[in-house]
Amino acid sequence: MKTLNEKLALLKARMDGGEKITIAILGLGSVGCYLLDYLVSLGDPQLKVVVVGRNREKLQKDVNIIRTAACIRHQLRSEVEIVADCDFTDVASITDVLARTKPDFIVNSSRLFAGLKYGTISWSNLRAYGIWSPLSVQLGKNIMEAYEQAGCNAISINTSYSDAVIPWLKSAGMDYFDFGSGNLNHLIPRMKFHVAEKFGIDNWNEIDITLVASHFHDVVISKEGHTEGVDLLLSVKYEGKVLEINPAELFAQCSIAMPTDQKRNMMNASSNFDIICAVLSAIREGTRKKIHSPGVGGYIGGYPFIIDGSDGRIRGGFAPEFPLDKMIQVNRKSIYLDGIEDVRDGTLFYTDELISKVERRFNVRIPKEVPLADSVQVADLLIEQIIKPQI
């Protein structure tokens, strides 16, 4: 597996040479559809978007409406290709698609158990989301196995619980996704809304927020406006100057009304879009772009990350506001509250607290340790004994 910086250099060479840049969206559910719409709306003739899935009829319908709407807006300049009959449970099937399409980016927006937001079950019962990690890792594991077999050098983005999934793959010695989407990208705009109002700032884009936390704090701050007693790492700046603001006040203002249905996936799709655009813009404009990504670098939790094209090269690295070791420590405290004690040596460890909660609420005993090789069996247990009885 090439390093992220090696992949970025390959992409820059292709872009500088005027070659088409191919973005493969693996799974065209609500996240994939929103993402396709956003990408097509760029009106970028250098981009080609390949949508990959199982059902050609469904894919064709979704692509047709997105292309038609973009044409109405006079934005349709990117090519869109459909690749059907790809089974994400079959590594060979995915390998064939990656080998044929040779993408520059891949976005995994597939789900093992589609049509359900797992948090609707786990938050009210467990106040934790990490229980679903074995489900989240399944298709991502298959995709990265295919990625390796196809000799793929695409910049890869995962959409499902990357805080633990990406470190799990890395710790097992596998190829792993470069970035995860979601989480902190959902919180930071809420913070910007309050900062802009408090300080009379008109341009939200000039508010520079750096935040370190895992998926748990995305949820608890968004829903309840507090950090459950964990001191997160936070920096708020405007025009390069630090703004003095009480973190507790800021977090409290993040609890704003949002829909709970599939419309929420606008945020996850936007997070994917933000990562792709940050890379493209850093290369084209020679600028530095900051993103926030769960699982980046194969580390547990969520981190601020810089894509830097400012000196004629292109490379990535963690944002300098906080030392990496402190970011790791905070993320481990954060994700512990989500039910994840550790991820190491290819094994995910649930917290004792989560195991007890699951047994009390669902009368199901989940194992303390889940080796990646056993994750299929644990995923089946979660589906059959917890998810299906609830729905």
Image (tube, rainbow, N blue to C red):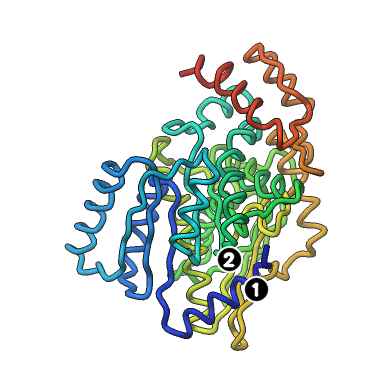
Where residue 260 sits: x, y (%)? 42, 35
Where residue 92 sits: x, y (%)? 53, 46
Instruction: State the residue position of label 2.
Output: 153
Q: Is residue 16 above or below residue 188?
A: below
Q: Nearer the viewer, residue 231 or 23?
A: 23
Q: Is residue 195 above or below residue 17?
A: above
Callout 1: 10 Å neighbours few (<14), some, many (20+)?
Answer: some
Type of amino acid at the residue the image marks with label 1: Glu
Where residue 1 sits: x, y (%)? 68, 62
Q: Is residue 318 above or below residue 294?
A: below
Give me the residue at 41% from left, 32% from top: 115
**Residue contact at pointers 1 and 2, CB within 8 angstroms:** yes
Number of numbered discs overlaid on the protein picture: 2
* Left or right: residue 45 compared with residue 372: left
Instruction: State the residue position of label 1.
Output: 6
Q: Nearer the viewer, residue 343 or 1?
A: 1
Callout 2: 10 Å neighbours few (<14), some, many (20+)?
Answer: many
Where residue 8 sits: x, y (%)? 59, 73
Q: Quadrant of residue 306?
A: bottom right
N-terminal of the pair, mark 1 or mark 2, is 1
Q: CA distance from mark 1 to mark 2?
A: 9 Å
Q: Is residue 255 above or below residue 242?
A: above
Give me the residue at 42% from left, 43% from top: 264
| Secondary-structure class at tag 2 | loop
Of the residues tagged 1 and 2, which is closer to the observer? 2
> Which label was assigned to residue 347?
none
Query: Furthest residue to the bottom?
Result: 312
* Left or right: residue 323 compared with residue 152: right
Type of amino acid at the residue the image marks with label 2: Asn
| Secondary-structure class at tag 1 | helix
